[in-house]
Amino acid sequence: YEFDHFSKMKVDIIPSYLGANSRMLHNSVKDGVDGIVLQSLGAGHIPESMLDGIEGAISASIPVVLSSRTMKGRFLTDTYGFIGAEKYLRNIGVIFGEDLTSQKVRMKLLVLLSTERSFEEIRHEFEKNYYK
């Protein structure tokens, strides 16, 4: 295993907040990132104004993994279906980082990307339940 490969990978952490737009997402895609960690609002929701950037990243084959800005707890997973809610995000291809902080999601994504996992393998590694 070559550490140099790992250190050259780019994974950005992008916050969501009231009034956020897709500018940071578009810049990350343009900059050639390997992955994006998206900090959601508490329940796992994203402002609608960020969705075109999320969809652009996913269509460019860049994994977008959702993390929560809160320090503890899981997302809602099957409660709301409005645009920007958890059902909608899952349907467009966003991967859920479950109860990991943004920094932990970033490190896990870096490791998975460095081992050349497929998009579905990355999704599986994040969304499988280790605690059953």
Image (cartoon, grey):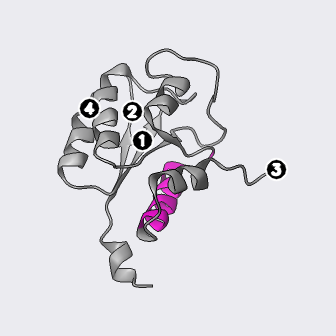
Instruction: Decide which of tag 4 and tag 1 comes sooner along the chain.
Output: 4
Which portion, as a residue range, is magenta? 99-113
Instruction: Decide which of tag 4 and tag 3 comes sooner along the chain.
Output: 4
Looking at the rendered structure, the kind of residue marked 2 is Ser
Q: Residue at x 61, y 43 (%)?
A: 98
Q: Which residue is mark 3?
A: 132
- Contact check, label 2 and label 4, Cβ < 8 Å: no
- The tag on residue 22 is 4
- The tag on residue 38 is 1
- Contact check, label 2 and label 1, Cβ < 8 Å: yes
Instruction: Decide which of tag 2 and tag 3 comes sooner along the chain.
Output: 2
Image height of 107 relative to 8, above or below? above
Image coordinates of residue 114 in percent, x first then y, are 42, 70
Q: How many marks?
A: 4
Measured in 3D between alpha carbons, the distance from the residue under mark 2 to the one under mark 4, in whole angstroms, is 10 Å
Image coordinates of residue 90 in percent, x first then y, are 51, 32
Instruction: Decide which of tag 2 and tag 1 comes sooner along the chain.
Output: 2
Instruction: Decide which of tag 2 and tag 4 comes sooner along the chain.
Output: 2
Q: Nearer the viewer, mark 2 or mark 1?
A: 1
Measured in 3D between alpha carbons, the distance from the residue under mark 4 to the one under mark 1, in whole angstroms, is 11 Å
Looking at the rendered structure, the kind of residue marked 4 is Ser
Q: Which residue is mark 2?
A: 16
